[in-house]
Amino acid sequence: MAKKRQAQYSGIGGQAVLEGVMMKNKTKYAVAVRKPDGNIDVQVEEYQGVCGDKKFAKFPLIRGVFAFIDSLVLGMRVTMHSASFYEDGEDTSGETAKKASGGRADDIMMGITVAISVVIAVALFMLLPFLISDLLGKYIRNASLVAILEGGLRILLFVGYIAAISLMKDIKRLYMYHGAEHKCINCIERGRPLTVKNVMRSSRQHKRCGTSFLLFVVLVSVIVFFFIRVDNMALKLVVRLLLVPVIAGISYEIIRLAGKSDHILIRIISAPGLWMQRLTTREPDEDMVMVAIASVEAVFDWKAYLTETFGYEADDL
């Protein structure tokens, strides 16, 4: 039996969208969408990020905050683009689709939407568990136990939210495209030619997934808030809010390391995120895989990557 080939970092990442997949390689990204008429639309654009090439945005810990903001902004942009094909049940692949990815007014609206989303997420997964645990603290005198309860509530809320939305019909299809995205990246990083057959037999779990990042944010917050404690109620809230960027930065560095290392310790640390992906990914069908492949090929030369990384000759592919 052939030895299992160790995964090699490719640098590409992606996101599932409505009836499609976005793939990003450096500053270039592509959105492939299966249109109502059955054809695949592929749009390729550039995204420099909120800070462009500023050096301070690339420092460890700090870069994680900007990477998170970029993922939210770009995610909102490509989601609007994919949704434009299905407005009122009509194929709007013309001007409406173009408007979804450009314009000053659209950028402002996306910025506002992203800001509101962050506020809601912080309130739901950071502040709500704190407020509930603070109420319980009036009956529980052990500060460590209260901190553990707060962490447990935060984890329970996050997992419960993911499990609840996974039951929705539209989300199930989105998670199938999410699985197709992961399978394509795993196929390439395992050194296999990017064909439908190879992608279908690849894993739908990946260590660099956004699901893993969010779970790390929750888990890291549990650890940080356990050791950093203050008595004043108002100060507790302020400390938690101020530490959110720090927690995001730490979580990003963990995910970044996980994507480049296969060490046993890294595999153990990555395991909870991979387990969570059983909820946020589903097995795609071949049509979905074809969409994901189209997105990859628009921004990434996988043949050159396999030749350079695994030593394949072009004729072997």
Image (cartoon, helix red, strand yellow):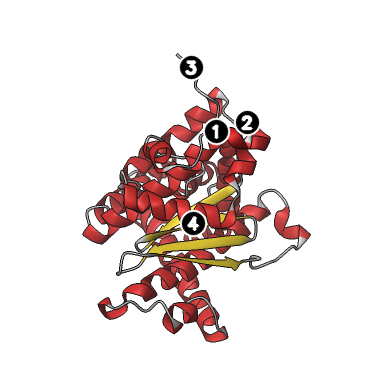
Callout 4, which amino acid? Ser
Report x, y in % for residue 4.
Answer: 49, 22
User: Residue 196's quadrant in the figure?
Assistant: top left
Crowd tier of the residue under label 2, counting other residues whose Cα lies within 10 Å: few below 14, some 14–19, many 20 or above: some
Q: CA distance from mark 2 to mark 1?
A: 6 Å
Q: Earlier in the sequence, mark 1 or mark 4?
A: 1
Residue 312 left/right relative to 97 = right
Q: Which residue appears at 48% of the width and 38% of the height? A: 187
Q: Mark 4 and 3 residues: CB-CB less than 8 Å, in contact?
A: no
Which residue is tagged 4? 295
Give how far across and how far down residue 13 sits, in percent.
Answer: 54, 50
Q: On residue 249, which mark appears? A: none
Q: CA distance from mark 4 to mark 2?
A: 22 Å
Q: Residues within 10 Å of mark 4 (few under 14, many from 20)?
A: many
Residues marked 2 and 1 touching at CB (< 8 Å): yes
Residue 85 falls in which quadrant of the image?
A: bottom left
Q: Which image quarter is the C terminus in?
A: top right
Q: Earlier in the sequence, mark 4 or mark 2?
A: 4
* Disc nearer the start of the sequence (4/3): 3
Per the image, label 4 sits on a secondary structure element best described as helix
* Residue type (three-letter) at the residue carrying disc 1: Gly
Marking on residue 2: 3
| Foreground of the two, 76 or 62 | 76
Question: Image check: 46 left or right of 277?
Answer: right
Specify the amino acid type for callout 3: Ala
